[in-house]
Image (cartoon, rainbow, N blue to C red):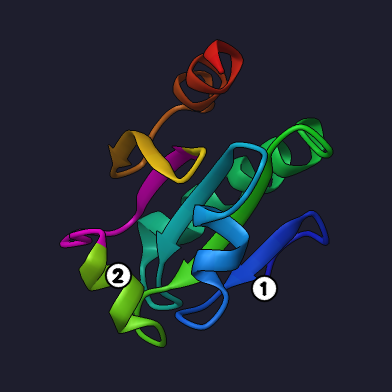
Amino acid sequence: MASDAVIELTDANFEQEVVNSDVPVLVDFWAEWCMPCRMLAPVIDEIAGEYAGKVKVGKVDTDANREVSVNYGISAIPTIILFNKGEVVRKFVGVTPKTDFVDELDKI
């Protein structure tokens, strides 16, 4: 999947890993067949490494995890959502520059 610092999120573990997390969580909603998702993957991996211990970074395969994808209104991928204390802080849709993620993470 991705680097060791990136958590695989599923319908089954999403609430525990994201909603109940005591640290901010950056969640990448993606699919294997999505080329923009693949383009964004190295950026997500970099952020996971740079913010290890301060922020959780996870990926949700939207094809395999429909429930959580529907719950958060994912209609286009890649969509990256930043959560803090279980609440959506910011939603990014499409290929987004790393600086946009970093700016939001540094505000928290």
Compared with 52, 13 (above or below) is: below
Q: Are marks 1 and 2 in contact (CB under 8 Å)?
A: no
Q: Is 48 inside the magenta-drawn segment?
A: no
Q: Residues within 10 Å of mark 2 (few under 14, many from 20)?
A: many
**Residue 19, x across and y down, in percent:** 49, 54
Compared with 65, 51 (above or below) is: above
Name the residue carrying label 1. 1
Say what amino acid the circle numbered 1 marks: Met
Say what amino acid the circle numbered 2 marks: Ser
- SS at circle 2: helix
**Residue 33, x across and y down, in percent:** 38, 77
Name the residue carrying label 2. 69
Asked where in the image residue 47 lies, by quadrant, the reply is: top right
Asked where in the image residue 6 lies, by quadrant, the reply is: bottom right
- Count all numbered tags in the image, as a single digit: 2
Q: Kindly identify which numbered label has been placed on residue 55.
A: none
Residue stretch in magenta: 72-83
